[in-house]
């Protein structure tokens, strides 16, 4: 894990929690005099859907200067995959996309929260994974444009035309996800979970992206990786807690 926390109680708790889950946090720096990023999550009891109030804190202090041109050269071997999202400054994310592309490292971008990405950076993204509201925002459409397959296919094609290299995946909650790759693979992956079993959707997208990255890093194909990711997200929504509810590998398999 690479990122930043503040020199406050939240920062130390976040790093301790990651360590307890056997995650290497040597790359998580502590920014002095800055508070840690905080998210307040509200879960609707009736629908299990969530709303998140977010303040970036130390995440906004993660700058291009934290990642020199030889950043990836310090890894041996090189990372298999770099996973990025947009809770850090956009310029930092774009810089890392460029560095990863230069070193031949596969990239996954989850543009959340959604921000407009300069068009020439899409060609540095191997896998673009986003939800329906993010997909609508980045293409200038209303969310209901994705209510049918024709709208979904139109939007996915636009992202591929912008240069995404291996796949575009739009996650749509209970509907599952729709994917398409430049080589013509496309279709729905449906979740195996009943609506009445869903208790908390917070972190479902994170579980999906993480599981997808793991499967891809192990050399599995697109279809296999998406099914693995969908199972992980389906298990997550049956548990409470954004982080505590993310399943272990054995649960997914």
Image: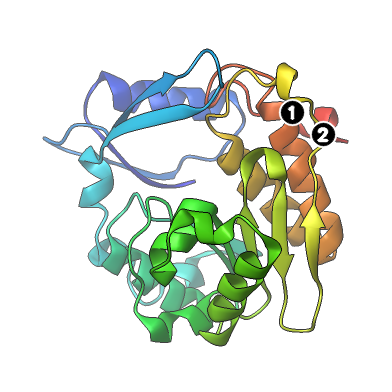
In the picture shown, does residue 49 fall above or below 95?
A: above
Residue 246 visible at all: yes
Which residue is more in the foreground, 224 or 47?
Answer: 47
Query: Element under label 1?
Result: helix
Where does the C terminus fall, quadrant-wise? top right
In the picture shown, does residue 47 fall above or below 37?
A: above
Residue 127 vs residue 251: left or right? Answer: left
Residue 33 vs residue 183: left or right? Answer: left
Residue at 72% across / 71% down in the picture?
180
How many numbered discs, if any? 2
Residue 242 vs residue 137: left or right? Answer: right
**Colour scheme employed for the rendering of this structure:** rainbow
Residue at 15% across / 36% down in the picture?
34
N-term mark: 2 or 1: 1
Q: Give the residue pinned by disc 1.
A: 235
Distance from Cα at disc 2 to Cα at disc 1: 7 Å
């Amino acid at each position: 894990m690479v990122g930043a926390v503040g020199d406050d109680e939240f920062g130390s708790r976040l790093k301790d929690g990651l360590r307890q889950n056997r995650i290497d946090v040597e790359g998580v720096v502590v920014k002095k005099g800055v508070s840690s990023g905080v998210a307040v999550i509200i879960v609707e009891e009736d629908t299990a859907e969530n709303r998140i109030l977010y303040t970036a804190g130390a995440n906004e202090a993660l700058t291009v200067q934290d990642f020199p041109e030889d950043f990836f050269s310090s890894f041996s071997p090189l990372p298999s995959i770099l996973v990025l999202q947009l809770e850090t400054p956009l310029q930092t994310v774009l810089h890392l996309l460029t560095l990863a592309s230069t070193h031949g490292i596969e990239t996954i971008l989850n543009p959340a929260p959604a921000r407009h990405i300069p068009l020439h950076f899409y060609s540095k993204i191997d896998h673009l994974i986003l939800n329906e509201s993010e997909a609508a925002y980045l293409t200038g459409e209303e969310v209901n444009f994705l209510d049918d397959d024709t709208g979904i296919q139109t939007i996915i094609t636009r992202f591929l035309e912008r240069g995404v290299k291996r796949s575009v995946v739009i996650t749509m909650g209970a509907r599952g996800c729709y994917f398409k790759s430049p080589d013509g693979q496309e279709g729905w992956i449906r979740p195996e979970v009943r609506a009445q079993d869903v208790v908390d959707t917070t972190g479902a997208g994170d579980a999906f992206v993480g599981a997808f990255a793991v499967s891809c890093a192990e050399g599995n194909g697109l279809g296999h990786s998406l099914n693995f990711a969908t199972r992980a997200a389906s298990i997550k929504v049956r548990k409470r807690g954004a982080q505590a509810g993310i399943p272990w590998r054995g649960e997914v398999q």
